[in-house]
Image (cartoon, rainbow, N blue to C red):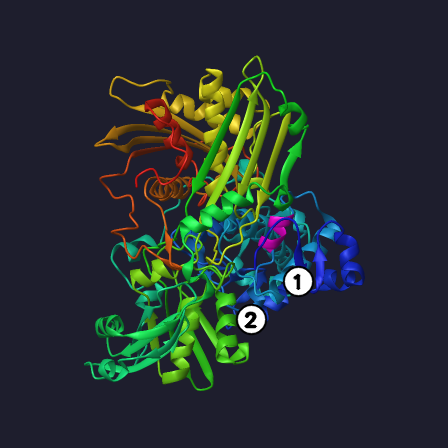
Amino acid sequence: MKLNRRTFLISGLTLGGGLAVGLGASVGALALHDRREHQREGLPSEDALVALWIQIQRDSTVVVLSPHTEMGQAAHIGLGQIVAEELDVPWENVVVEQAPADRAFSNGNIIQGFIFEDDAIGGFFKRVLDNAFFIGGDLGTVQMTGGSTSIRFTGWRSMRTAAAAARELLISAAAGQLGVPESTLSTRDAQVVHAASGRALTYGELAADAARLPVPQEPTLKDPSQYRHVGRSHQRDDLPDKILGAPVYGIDCEVEGMKHVAVIGTEAIFGAVEAVTNEAEVLARRGVEAVVMVQEGVAVVADNPWRAEQAARAVQFTERAPENAVASSQSLLVDMQQALTEPERFSTVVEHGDVVAAGEGAEGTVVEAEYFVPFLAHAPMEPPNVTLWREGDTVHAASGVQGPLSARTWIADRLQLPIEQVVFHPHTMGGSFGRRAAAGDDMLNFITQACTVFQAVDQPIKLCWSREMDLRFDRYRKQSIARYRGVLGADGTVQVWQADSYGEVNIPPDAKTAYQVPHLRQRNIQEDTFVPYAYWRSVEASIHCFYNECFIDELAQAAGADPLQYRLDHLPDDHRLRRVLEAVREQAGWRTGVAEDGTAMGVAAYELFGSACAQIARVGMVNGNPKVHEVWCALDCGTVINPDAVIAQMEGGMIFGLTAALYGRIDITEGGVKQSNFHDYRMVRMADAPRLHVTLVPDGSAPGGVGEVAVPHLSAAVPNALAVLGERPRALPLIS
């Protein structure tokens, strides 16, 4: 399922331009839907669920049930801080747990957030919308982590309101028990206090009564001046286990009697195994128990992972090549270049003015450029894995995925079981970056293989892919190209900006340039290729930031202007990018030209996922290759929940983005992926890593995204610095 802001299918009705009409007679039923009761039914615990997502135990411990999985981004601690703030409890009282992979905890808030990016909807209609998207998320099994949605949508839009409602419910319950007006009560440190008499009741004493009261629909939220948790750096309680190697990831799961499964893949993507030609030989190997043909490969079941992997590598088989077995990255590129010459294939991303008329016979400087980005893999540290076992009539599954409810549904479908007979146990992930989402082309292919093996052997199994399987059977960020044409006026400002690209544009705002140009047209051709697609960290911005920020730099160079000031000159006075550009200019001590040490600076600025970010890279050349010595970053992500977590995410995002800029490339040859491991799909290592500096310049608005926001900028900032040092690169990666 691909989420976008244009349309979304809910209960068979399209939500889009005519929302009220689309809901029609369902409005009354939606308004009366009791979401809290729905979540209670999905919980095994008897502790009081006072409001959505929030349980209060007898000892006043507050359990926050997160529908988002943890993959290193510290989402759980941020959600806990938001609830602690609005509920007025000490940090040590808060525990964040993974919500069950149950329809009751599907998360329509992220759908609503993608479609309606503001909070202008209120009152009765807001309740209708909240319930509509909740029910729609339920039917669509939406329990997704991705798109920087955890804090800005679920946390700020939903859990914050739920916590404020829970606080008001506790006050109402206390008023009843104490026999005093609600207006005479206040909350502090998990207690409701009656100051006049000195009496106080703990949340644990009030929770059961509060849970029986009707939930207030528009509770009063705290004023930011009263914040004690939001904006402070609370320590992450998940770090000790991770640092000390405690078993917290899906790959750590152990089940009694479990067998291990390794897979060898076909040569071509979507190839089909016809026959295993040495099955008897493989079965004769020590510890090997079964050989099973699976989707895109052959699986071997053995008594330990080493024997399974070695046996899988010894398997010989014949395969039926798919139609795409003759395709390559180069042949696909030729097709893309041809497509850009066919105007009828374009769709418009954004357009104003008259690009054609303004560009014909233009007397100003004309700048033209063609850019290229390759396919990219996700390559998380923890390779895809899943454990399956049976208890009576129920099948259990354990894995780290971005959508536990989707994975549960996926397994039920493949095992042909009612979903009630499948229990899914979500685990922390060792990275994901979009790989473990269900929104893409057959993203859970490793689980599909495991289900086939499980049906064949009918015993507990753990399937874990090798790094080779992970790279060769990933679902990839698309290869893309773009052609740009700009015309400068007599004063050097941009008068015409035309951009034609070939590639996925699922989130149009993340593909648009922010710069003010009188005549602007950005068009796109949606990709049409057999190579399986998946969201890749920062999505459209990972491609279009490179295009747009390199092109504005080329225009500045043609105008003989300071490229950072040139950006400011083409932004409205109140634009958020101005603040981060000015902040990073001061932070880095911005300079133009080549410094005495042979380095140069390049800049890039971009808005995505509700945040604005600018980065400056100081780059030199070492042994003929680019060397990034230092990076400065300024971020405006609205309200900062946890400063340390935000800075850590920005630092990680910059390293991830730098890896793609310098080395990232997946090549298709004869319908298959050429790269196989980190020797030919290289990562930034410690020796390559620059010094990183992050400055937060929040504007106090609603929180924006963080985890993906830092990723795309260095793909442009580094080439912009290299252009100062010599020839401008227009294709990634920068190091062959």
Most extreme residue toward the bottom, as rendered? Answer: 392
Q: Amino acid at mark 1?
A: Leu
Q: Quadrant of the C terminus?
A: top left
Of residue 175 and residue 433, the one placed in the foreground of this image is 433
Local crowd size for mark 2, using a 10 Å CA cut-off: few (<14), some (14–19), many (≥20): some
**Vertical comparison of 403 with 331: above or below:** below
* Label annotation for residue 213: 1
- Residue 358: name its quadrant: top right
Specify whether 443 is left or right of 278: right
Residue 45: tell me if it is visible. no
Of residue 403 and residue 263, the one placed in the foreground of this image is 263
Pair 2/1: label in front: 2
Most extreme residue toward the left, as rendered? Answer: 286
**Location of residue 402 in the rendering, given as x and y in whole percent from the top left corner:** 46, 59
**Mark positioned earlier in the residue sequence (2 or 1):** 2
Secondary structure that dominates the magenta span:
helix
Q: Amino acid at mark 2?
A: Gly
Of residue 357 and residue 493, the one placed in the foreground of this image is 357
**Vertical comparison of 191 with 282: above or below:** above
**Location of residue 700 in the rendering, given as x and y in whole percent from the top left corner:** 54, 34
* Label annotation for residue 42: 2
| Residue 602 colored in magenta in the image | no
Local crowd size for mark 1, using a 10 Å CA cut-off: few (<14), some (14–19), many (≥20): few
**Location of residue 207 in the rendering, given as x and y in whole percent from the top left corner:** 56, 62
Element type where label 1 sits in the image? loop
- Residue 340: name its quadrant: top right
Q: Which residues are magenta?
A: 109-115
Specify whether 667 is left or right of 199: left
Element type where label 2 sits in the image? loop
